[in-house]
Amino acid sequence: MKQQIVPTQTEIKFQHDELIVSKTDLTGRITYANKVFMRVCDFSEEELLGQPHNIIRHPDMPRGVFWGVWNTIKQGQEFFGMVKNLTAHGDYYWVLANIRPDFRGGKSVGYFSVRRSPSRKLIESIIPVYKEMLSFEQGKGKDAAQLSWQRLEKQLASQGTTYEQYILNLVESTKER
């Protein structure tokens, strides 16, 4: 059972040249965590291995984004997105995540994620989108995550883009020069 962590308002930052790396099995249980991941999230290897990756899920994250993650990677595609994560002590950190299936011998055996530190401008650009998704999800019941993701996809499609392209465009437009 997931330990109840009380979120704080303290942001943890890591260097732009550092990569957070983890692997999971097909059910999302952590099978590998690099040292940067352990340091930033403040969980030990023993505390992470075998746990569901959502051990670091921050309550400010819309469930719809994770529905989109799972829907994408289960189709064998990679996912690019912004995620706010929770540390062992309730602090938070933002990542620009790339999640993809981990194939061995042509067969998916789990998932591989590489995360980097996003720019402040990128974080500030995605916060209102996620707040709107969270608000939409309230009172929608068990289908809230799927409905929230589909609503976001529809909004983005009306602008001629997808979530992945939206994120990649944000990355490009918010690069600190």
Image (tube, rainbow, N blue to C red):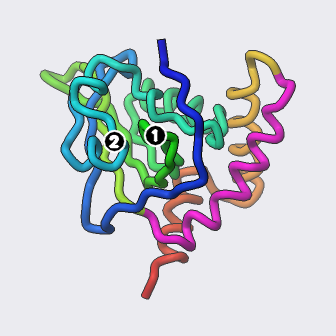
The residue wearing badge 2 is 42
Left or right: residue 50 versus residue 66 is left
The answer to whether the residue labelled 1 contacts the one labelled 2, judged by CB atoms less than 8 Å apart, is yes
Q: Tell me the quadrant of the picture where the C terminus can be found.
A: bottom left
Q: Quadrant of residue 43?
A: top left
The residue wearing badge 1 is 89
Residue placed most toward the observer, 145 or 100: 145
Identify the amino acid type marked 2: Asp
Q: Residue 109 appears at what percent x and percent y? A: 24, 19
Q: Residue 95 appears at what percent x and percent y? A: 44, 53
Which residue appears at 74% of the width and 20% of the height?
Answer: 143
Magenta segment, which residues?
Answer: 118-140
Q: Quadrant of residue 17?
A: bottom left
Identify the amino acid type marked 1: His
Position of residue 84 relative to residue 119, above or below, is above
Left or right: residue 144 versus residue 67 is right
Residue placed most toward the observer, 160 or 145: 145
